[in-house]
Amino acid sequence: MALKMSGVVSILSLIYLCLAIRSTQSYGGEFYDGKPSGYDDPPPCEDLGIGRFCIANCSLPGIYVCPRRHYFIPDKPPILSACPSGLLCQQRGGGRVKCAYGWDCHPVTDDPNVTISTGPSTTPGPSVVTNVIPGNLSRDEVPQFVYFSFDDAVNRMNYNLYSNLFAGRFVNPNGCPTTVSFNLCNESTNYELVRRLHRQGHEIASHSILHTNPKFWDGEMWEYEIQGMRELISDKTGIKEDEIVGMRAPFLVLGGNKQFSLLERFNYTYDASMVPAFSSNQEEPLWPFKLTGKPPRRYFFEPGTPTEAYPSVWEVPMNPYFYCPHAPDGAVSMLDGCHPGSYNATYLYLKYNFLRHYNSPSKAPFGINMHAAWFHPAWPYHFQAMEDFIGEICRLRNVYIVSVSRILKWMEDPVPLSRISESEAVKCN
C-alpha cells in the first residue's frame, strides 16, 4: 500500500511540476501566458526530469521559433531539441514535400497558371510576384536595403540589446542612423520603452494582443487582435494609429481573406507573414509585392493565403535563410531558427545570407526576421557576430539599414543611388 501511495505521490508531483512550469512561461524573466506555435491544446507532459525536457509536443515554457530547435526554461540554460512531429515533412507517396512554417505540408510543384515577372515592373499584376528591381533601375543604381524585424514584447530584458545595436551606433552612408521594425504583442511589453524606440525613428507594428494561434480566428477576432493591438499601442504611447502601418501574424499563421480585408479596411500598408517556399538556395529572393491577385502557389502555398485581391496592401515576403547546418535542406524561415554553434559559424551564416541578396541580379531587400531570444547570454557569440556583421555591411556605400515601411516608401518612388539623398525613405528622422 505504501508503495502504491508513493507511486501516486510521484505521479502527482510530476503533474504538479509540469503544470507549474506551463503556467509560468518566461520571456527573459518576464512572464506571459502563451503556447508553442502549431498547437492549440498541447497534450500533457509525459516525461520531465531535472535537466531534461518534456516530449516534443508538450507546452514547455520558452520562445519557440521555426523550425523549433530550441526553447528556454526559467533559470536553466537553453536546450536544443528536435522539431516536433508534423513540422518536419517526410516523403509521402514518393513525392517530395516541404513544410513552410504552416499547418500542413504540401507537394513542391509549379502551378502552370503562375507567371514570374521577367521584365521591368514596379507593381506586380494579378498572380505575379517579382524579383525585378522597381523603377527600371539598373542593378548598380539600386540600393541594397537591409531591414530588421523583431517579434513580440519590448521590455527591459531586451531593450538594452536593441539600444546597443540601433541607438545611433551604426549609420547609413548618408550619415543617418539605422532604423528597424518591432512587431509588438501586449504581454510583457513596456510601453515607455516602445515610446523611446519610436522617438529614435524606429517603426512600431502590430503582432496581436494575446499572441495566440490564429488558426481558428474569425473576422471579429482578427480585428480584436491586430487592430486592437494597434489601438492599444497608440493609447499607451501616443504614437498615431496611422503611423502603425504594418503587421505580422502570430506564429506566421495566415488568416486568408479575413486577415487581408481587415488590413485593407483599416488602411494598413503591409503584412509581413508569408514565407516563400523555395526549393533551394538557387532561387532568387523576392521583392515585396502588392496583393493585386492571389499569391502564386509556386511560392506561397500555406493555408491562409488570400484568394482575393487587396491592391492597397503590400506583402513583404520573409525570404528564408540558408546555410543552417542543423535544419532540413539547410533552410529556416526566421533567422533565429538556426544556431550555428560558434562565432565563426554564426558570422558566416549571416554573411552568406546577406550575400545571397547582395549578389543576386535584383538585390532584393535582405530581411532579418527574428526574436531577441537569439541573443540569450548562453550564446554570446550570436550578439558578437551580429555586431561585427552590421559593422561590416555599414561600410558598404550602397547598403541602407531601414525599417520595413521605409523600403516600401522607396519602392513607391524608386530613385537611384546617385540621388538617394532625395528619398524620404532614407532621410534622418
Image: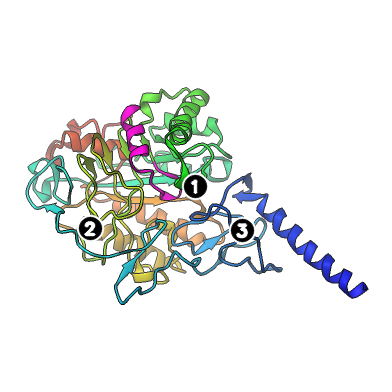
Q: Is residue 102 visible?
A: yes
Residue located beneath label 2 in the image: 298
Dominant secondary-structure state across the stretch colored magenta: helix
Tell me the kind of residue under disc 2.
Arg
Mark 2 neighbour density, 10 Å: few (under 14) some (14–19) many (20 or more): many
- The first of marks 1 and 3 along the sequence is 3
Which is more foreground, mark 1 or mark 3?
1
Numbered disc 3: secondary structure: loop
Q: Position of residue 361 (x, y in %)?
A: 14, 56
Q: CA distance from mark 3 to mark 2?
A: 35 Å
Numbered disc 2: secondary structure: loop
Residue located beneath label 1 in the image: 213
Tell me the kind of residue under disc 1.
Asn
Q: Quadrant of residue 282?
A: bottom left
Give the position of the C terminus as an image quadrant.
top left
Residue 261: say if magenta.
yes
Q: Residue at x 6, y 49 (%)?
A: 119
Q: CA distance from mark 1 to mark 2?
A: 25 Å
Q: Position of residue 342 (x, y in %)?
A: 46, 68
Q: Quadrant of residue 335?
A: bottom left
Which is more foreground, mark 3 or mark 2?
2
Give the position of the N terminus as an image quadrant.
bottom right
Residue located beneath label 3 in the image: 60
Span colored in magenta: 248-267
Q: Position of residue 70 (x, y in %)?
A: 52, 62
Residue 293: say if magenta.
no
